Image (tube, grey):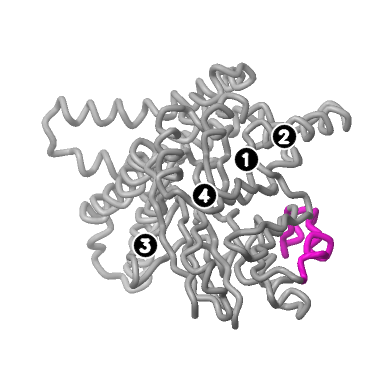
C-alpha cells in the first residue's frame, strides 16, 4: 500500500512538471515533441523498476557501484524537476491571485492561462542542475587538483624552512568504480617528493573490505620521513548494520591491518617524534573528534599530545575541522600546535571557487572552516577537500584535492 501511495504521488508530481514541457513543445516538430515526451515519462518507469526489485542487486558486490550511479541519476533527475516545479508553483500563485482579483472586482478575466515564458523558464531551471550534476559525475570524480600553500610560522628553525608536507583525506574507497585514474593521484603525490605525507581519515565508506582492491595502489605513496594516517568517522563501521558486536570488531581490526599493509603509520590518539634536519618534529594523530553531537568522540588530544613538549614543531592530524575550534585553539595547553590538518567536509563536492577572490559551498552553513587554509593567532588549520567522493559520485566546482604545504619563516 505504501508503495502504491508513493507511486501515485510520484505520478502526480511528474504530471505537474510535464505541463511545462507540453506547453513549450507545442510548436516543435512532431518527432522531437513525441521523443521528448517519451524521454520524460521513461524516468518514472525506471523509478518503478528500481522499486520493484532492481535495488536488490545492491546485495551483490559486482552491481553495487553501478547501482550507485543508477540511483544518483534518478535523484539528479527528480531534483532537477523539483526546481522546475518551484517555477511552475510561482506561476500558479500568480494565476490564483489574478483569479481572486477578477472574481471580487467583477472584471474581465485576462492572463489566467499558464505563461509560456514561465514554462520555458521552468525547463531551463530544470536543465541547469541536470546538466551540471551529470557533468560532475562523468568528468570530475577523478579530476585531481593540487592545491599549494606556503605557511609562515614564527620561530621556525632555519633548517625546517621549505619542509614539504602532502596531505590527502577522505578516500572513501567504497565509492570508487575505477582503478586506473587513482594511479594518477599517486603519481601526483609522489612527484612532489614530500618530506611527510598525511592522510586525515575516512579510508572507507562503511567496511574495511572496500579498501582491499586498492591497497596495491595506495601502498605506492612515498615520503622521505613516512606516511602518517588517522581515522575518520566512517572508519569505525558505525554506519553499517553488523550482525554482531564481534563482527564489527573484526572489521575494525581489518581496517587497522589495511593501514599497516599500505605502510602507513596509523596513530590512534598517539604521536610520533621525528628527527628531521636536526630538529625534533611531533606528528600528533587523534581519532575522530567532532564538536557536533551527531558524531562519536573517539579522540583524546591530551593523550596524543603528552610527551611532545620538547618538539621544535608540532603538527596535528584531526579528521573533523570543528575539533580545531572546539579544543585546539581554545585550550592554552595546545597553543603550540602550529598546524592542524583536517578533512571531512569534502567541500560538499559542490560549490563555486574563484581562486583569490570568492568561494561558496552549501557546506559553509554547517562548517565555518570547510576548505583551504585558516588562521587564528599563531595557529593554522588546513581543511582538505577530499580525494574521493561519497553519496553523489561526482563533483561540481569542488574538485578532489591533493594538498601541498611548504613551511616558511614568518
Q: Earlier in the sequence, mark 4 or mark 3?
A: 3
Decide: few, some or many residues near mark 4? Use Cα within 10 Å; few <14, some 14-19, many ≥20.
many
**Observer-nearest residue: 199 or 70?**
199
> Would you name the residue on which mark 4 appears?
386
Residue at left offset 26%, top offset 55%: 118
> Would you name the residue on which mark 2 appears?
255
Q: CA distance from mark 3 to mark 1?
A: 26 Å
Q: CA distance from mark 3 to mark 2?
A: 34 Å
Q: Earlier in the sequence, mark 1 or mark 2?
A: 1
Residue 353, numbered label: 3
Decide: few, some or many residues near mark 3? Use Cα within 10 Å; few <14, some 14-19, many ≥20.
some
Residue 26, numbered label: none
Q: CA distance from mark 2 to mark 4?
A: 19 Å
- Front position among marks 4 and 3: 4
Q: Earlier in the sequence, mark 2 or mark 4?
A: 2
Residue at left offset 75%, top offset 71%: 310
Decide: few, some or many residues near mark 1? Use Cα within 10 Å; few <14, some 14-19, many ≥20.
many
In the picture provided, is 407 more to the left or to the right than 122? right
What range of the chain is rendered magenta? Answer: 288-309
Q: Is residue 230 visible?
A: yes
SS at badge 3:
strand
> Would you name the residue on which mark 1 appears?
203
Q: Earlier in the sequence, mark 1 or mark 4?
A: 1
The image quadrant of residue 73 is: top left
Q: Earlier in the sequence, mark 3 or mark 2?
A: 2
Q: CA distance from mark 4 to mark 3?
A: 15 Å
Mark 1 in CB contact with mark 2 (< 8 angstroms): yes
Mark 2 in CB contact with mark 4 (< 8 angstroms): no
SS at badge 1:
loop
The image quadrant of residue 317 is: bottom right
**Residue 70 vertical position relative to residue 123 in the rendered view, above or below:** above
Instruction: Find residue 163 and report its horizontal and vertical position in percent.
Output: 50, 62
Amino acid at each position: 500500500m505504501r508503495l502504491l501511495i508513493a507511486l501515485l504521488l510520484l505520478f502526480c508530481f511528474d504530471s505537474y512538471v510535464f505541463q511545462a514541457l507540453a506547453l513549450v513543445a507545442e510548436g516543435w516538430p512532431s518527432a522531437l515533441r513525441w521523443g521528448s515526451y517519451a524521454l520524460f515519462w521513461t524516468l518514472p518507469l525506471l523509478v518503478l523498476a528500481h522499486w520493484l526489485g532492481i535495488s536488490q542487486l545492491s546485495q551483490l558486490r559486482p552491481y553495487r557501484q553501478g547501482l550507485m550511479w543508477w540511483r544518483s541519476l534518478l535523484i539528479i533527475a527528480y531534483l532537477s524537476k523539483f526546481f522546475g516545479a518551484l517555477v511552475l508553483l510561482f506561476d500558479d500563485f500568480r494565476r490564483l491571485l489574478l483569479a481572486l482579483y477578477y472574481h471580487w472586482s467583477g472584471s474581465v478575466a485576462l492572463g489566467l492561462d499558464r505563461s509560456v515564458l514561465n514554462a520555458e523558464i521552468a525547463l531551463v531551471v530544470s536543465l541547469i542542475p541536470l546538466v551540471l550534476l551529470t557533468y560532475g559525475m562523468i568528468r570530475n570524480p577523478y579530476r585531481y587538483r593540487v592545491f599549494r600553500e606556503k605557511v609562515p610560522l614564527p620561530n621556525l628553525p632555519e633548517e625546517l624552512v621549505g619542509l614539504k608536507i602532502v596531505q590527502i583525506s577522505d578516500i572513501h574507497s567504497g565509492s570508487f568504480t575505477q582503478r586506473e585514474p587513482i594511479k594518477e593521484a599517486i603519481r601526483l603525490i609522489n612527484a612532489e617528493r614530500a618530506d611527510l605525507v598525511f592522510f586525515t581519515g575516512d579510508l572507507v565508506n562503511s567496511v574495511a573490505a572496500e579498501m582491499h582492491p586498492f591497497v596495491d595502489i595506495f601502498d605506492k605513496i612515498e615520503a622521505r620521513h613516512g606516511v602518517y594516517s588517522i581515522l575518520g568517522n566512517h572508519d569505525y563501521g558505525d554506519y553499517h548494520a553488523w550482525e554482531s558486536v564481534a563482527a564489527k570488531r573484526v572489521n575494525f581490526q581489518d581496517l587497522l591491518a589495511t593501514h599497516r599493509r599500505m605502510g602507513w603509520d596509523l596513530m590512534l590518539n598517539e604521536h610520533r617524534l621525528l628527527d628531521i634536519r636536526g630538529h625534533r618534529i611531533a606528528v600528533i594523530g587523534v581519532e575522530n573528534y567532532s564538536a557536533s553531537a551527531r558524531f562519536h568522540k573517539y579522540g583524546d588530544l591530551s593523550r596524543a599530545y603528552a610527551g611532545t613538549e620538547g618538539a621544535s614543531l608540532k603538527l596535528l592530524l584531526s579528521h573533523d575541522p570543528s575539533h580545531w575550534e572546539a579544543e585546539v585553539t581554545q585550550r592554552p595547553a595546545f597553543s603550540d600546535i602550529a598546524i592542524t590538518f583536517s578533512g571531512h567536509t569534502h567541500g560538499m563536492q559542490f560549490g563555486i571557487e574563484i581562486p583569490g577572490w570568492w568561494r561558496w559551498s552549501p557546506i559553509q552553513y554547517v562548517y565555518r572552516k570547510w576548505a583551504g587554509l585558516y588562521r587564528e593567532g599563531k595557529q593554522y588549520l588546513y581543511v582538505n577537500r577530499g580525494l574521493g567522493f561519497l553519496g553523489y559520485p561526482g563533483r561540481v566546482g569542488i574538485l578532489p584535492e591533493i594538498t601541498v604545504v611548504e613551511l616558511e619563516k614568518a
